[in-house]
Image: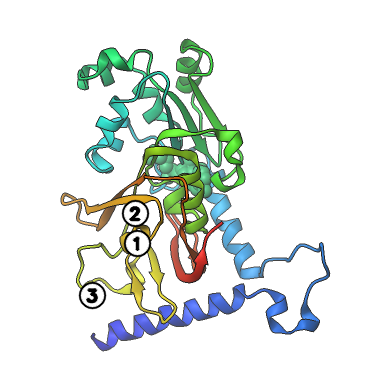
Amino acid sequence: MTTGRMRVRIMMFAAGILAAAVCLPAFAQGTSAKPPRGVAKKPPAAVTQARQEQAKIYETRGEDVPATYVTDRALLSYGSTLLPDFTRALAELGPADRWLDIGAGQGRAILEYYGERFDAMNPAGREQRGSKAQSVALSIEDRRTAEWHRIAAGLEPGKISYLHGRRLREYTPAELGRFRLASDVYGGFSYTSDLSLFMTRILDLLETGGSFYTLLINVQPETASGRSAQSAAAFQTEILAADGTPVKICAWLRQIGCAEVTCDTDPRSETPIERYRVRKTCDKVSVPALKQLHFAPGTPPARQFRLADRTAH
Ligand SMILES: C[S@@+](CC[C@H](N)C(=O)[O-])C[C@H]1O[C@@H](n2cnc3c(N)ncnc32)[C@H](O)[C@@H]1O
C-alpha cells in the first residue's frame, strides 16, 4: 500500500471511529446518563444534520434536482442495469403476481411495463401475461408525473399504485403484501442508512421463490482479490468485520439464511457496478445485522457499516 493510500485508509478509519463514537447512545457513557424510560433518545447533531441534508435531496424539484439524482430511468435502462435475467423474470409474471419497485422515482419503468412496446420486445409469454402483474412503486417523495396519472387512470383499478411519504422500513408487511418480484435501481438499497433492516424488510415482502434484483455502485466486487486497487475512500458502500477487515457486499448477502444470491460485475461499466439477485428460498430468513459507522449524504450517499454479532430484525 502506498503512503498516500495508507493515509486515506487511516482517515477513513478515524472518520468511522468518530462516527461510531458520535453514534453511541447516551447511556453507553455511564448508567447515570441513561435516559428515563419512555423518553425517545435524541440522535447526535452530526446524525441529524446528515439526515437533514439527505432529506433535502428528496425535496428538490425542477432545476434544483441534482444532475446525478436520476428519477426517470426507462424500463429498458432497468433491463440493462440489473442482472440480465430481470426482464425475463418480469415478462414471466402473470395477472396474479405482484411487482414492487423500491425507490421508483417517477415510476417510469412501471408505466412502460404496461405499454405495448414491452410486449413487442418480449413476445415470449405474452398469452400467459394477460393483463399483467399488479405493481407497486415506492418512493420517499412523490415524483409522479402527469403521464403517471394518465396511464394509471387507463388501467384496471388497483393495477398500479404509488406509495410515498415513507421509507420502506416504515411500512408493515401487512400494508404492502407479498411480491413475486422486487427491483431497486439506485433506490433504497443504495440510499438506506440501515442496510440490514432494509434487506430483512425486502425478504419479508417476497414470496418464497420470489427474487429481488438490485445493484450498488463503487463497491469492492466479489471477484476482487484482497483490497482492490481503488482506494477505500472511493467505496460508496463498505462493510467492515469487527476487526476492521473489509467484508464484500456479496459475501455479506451470501450469509443471509433462506436466500440464494447471485452477484456479478457489469462488464460494460467503467465504474465498478455490482449487480445482485437475492432469491428467497424459505421463510426463516435471517440477515446478519450491520451497524452504521458512517453516512455522508449524496446521490447516492457514501456508507460504511460494521458487521454486528447478531441478525437484523
Ligand atoms: C435516484 S432515485 C431512483 C429512481 C428510479 N429507480 C430510477 O432509476 O429512475 C432514488 C429513489 O429511491 C427512493 N428511496 C431512497 N431510499 C428509500 C427507502 N429507504 N425506501 C423507499 N424509497 C427510497 C427515493 O425516494 C427515490 O424515489
Name the residue at 47% across, 56% down.
Answer: 286
76 sits left or right of 52 in the view: left
- Most extreme residue toward the bottom, as rendered? 3
Q: Residues within 10 Å of mark 2 (few under 14, many from 20)?
A: many
Mark 2 residue element: strand
Q: Tags 2 and 1 in contact by the CB under 8 Å rule?
A: yes
In the rendered image, residue 295, in percent from the top left (x then y), is placed at 50, 65
- N-terminal of the two: label 2 or label 1? 2
- In the figure, is residue 220 to the left or right of 114? left
Q: Residues within 10 Å of mark 3 (few under 14, many from 20)?
A: few
Residue matched to label 1 = 249
Say whether residue 178 is visible.
yes
Mark whose residue sits in front, 2 or 1: 1
Residue at x 27% of width, y 32% of height: 87
- For badge 2, the amino acid type reads Leu
Residue type at numbered disc 1 = Ile
Q: Is residue 126 above or below residue 257?
A: above
Q: Which mark is residue 216?
A: 2
Instruction: Pick whichever, 278 or 9, lies toward us.
Output: 278
Q: Which residue is mark 3?
A: 226
**Residue drawn 25% across the image and 74% down it:** 227
Give the x, y percent position of residue 309.
50, 72
Where's residue 115, x and y in %? 33, 17
